[in-house]
Amino acid sequence: MTNTEPFNLPEPLRSIKKLQFLYPHASPIEPLNRLTSELSKLYPGAGSKPKLWIKREDSNSGVAFGGNKIRKLEYVVADAVEKGATVLVSTGGLQSNHMRHVAAAAVRSGLKAHLLPNDLVKSTDLEYKNLGNIQMTHLLGAEHSPYDSDPDEILKSLAAQGEIPYWIPSGASTHPLGGLGYARFAFELVQQEVQMGVYFDTIIVACASGSTLGGMIAGFKFIETLNGDGGDEGRMRRVAVGVDAFAGPPGKTKESVLRSSRTTAAVLGLDQWNAGSYGFVDERTRGAIKLLAGLEGILTDPVYTGKALAGVIEKYRLGEFSGRENVLFVHTGGVASLSAYPNVR
């Protein structure tokens, strides 16, 4: 089903085919009044105090709990359908939000899903291995190969069985269309700013494989190009900050983001923190999750959004938001994995 946009998109973005997995309205933006007040009390010497906001990408869809990955897959799965695919094939960690959404997107599109989980985290916890996202991919009917299976061999095997497989890389991040969902997000956000009378000068988002942040960067740059002014006159230039949830070498994450933003920019024509290793929870992340839950009633996850939130709090503590007025934390979802981390409480 083709989505009816709640806002006007320019070409070529308007004409690129996509499916409708998101709700037909923008994901909500809410003020984090209690968190803003609490941080100003905890860190009184942290310079000027911006207002904190949250964009609820965790509430952007009714498909398998929503989140950033389902926004990306609107474009990617549309391409799979157009090419006659019968099965979506993808990979990720056992608690991969991406694999959950690939399985759900396949169901919504009348396709099969075949997943290749990897054992990147090396956890021995039974909850991690059996609950959360991996449980949900089974409920969604996806087939699973053994850990660290060779994608090429799986694709050949499926083709030999008469299937037409469609490969989606982890997070859809190196897929040519993987950043388009968040380029579109930029237009959605700008319209919300106009409606609300608020300008978000800083945007914080979790970053691992890179196409969420990379797509945003390309989208905001596209908007600047269309406006013809290179920015908003009289306003502080917008900054998008990716909080590294992967814990690889910093240069590797930066390279992924830049690659994704350049790839997305080509389709359109045109800092970081690390709170512990990927899939493991450190005390800063645990504390950030509990703080937001206790103050705002909003849950975040240990792998991505909890780490991004820890980055928000740390930047606030260090006074690095000084001079900024409105800081937007993008909640990319992932709460489905919480049951796999019973010690986060």
Image: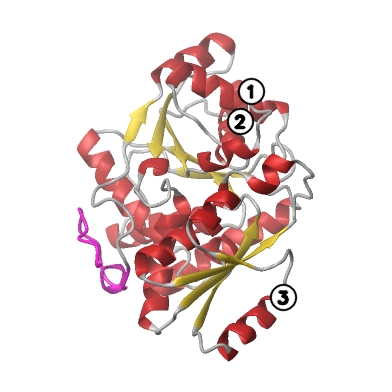
* Mark 2 crowd level (few <14, some 14–19, many ≥20, 10 Å Cα): many
Tell me where residue 23 appears, x and y as whole percent: 28, 50
* Mark 3 crowd level (few <14, some 14–19, many ≥20, 10 Å Cα): few
Q: Amino acid at mark 2?
A: Ala
Q: Quadrant of residue 275?
A: top right
Question: Horizontal placement of 264 versus 168: left or right?
Answer: left
Q: CA distance from mark 2 to mark 3?
A: 35 Å
Identify the residue position indicated by label 2 in the image.
310
Residue situated in front as seen by the camera: 167 or 207: 167
Q: Mark 2 or mark 1, which has the lower sequence index?
A: 1
Question: Horizontal placement of 266 versus 319: left or right?
Answer: left
Q: Amino acid at mark 3?
A: Asp
Q: Is residue 249 above or below residue 276?
A: below
Identify the residue position indicated by label 3 in the image.
150
**Which is more foreground, mark 2 or mark 1?**
1
- Tell me if label 2 and label 1 are in contact, CB under 8 Å: yes
Q: Residue at x 45, y 27 (%)?
A: 298
Q: Which mark is residue 287?
A: 1
Dot 3: what SS? loop
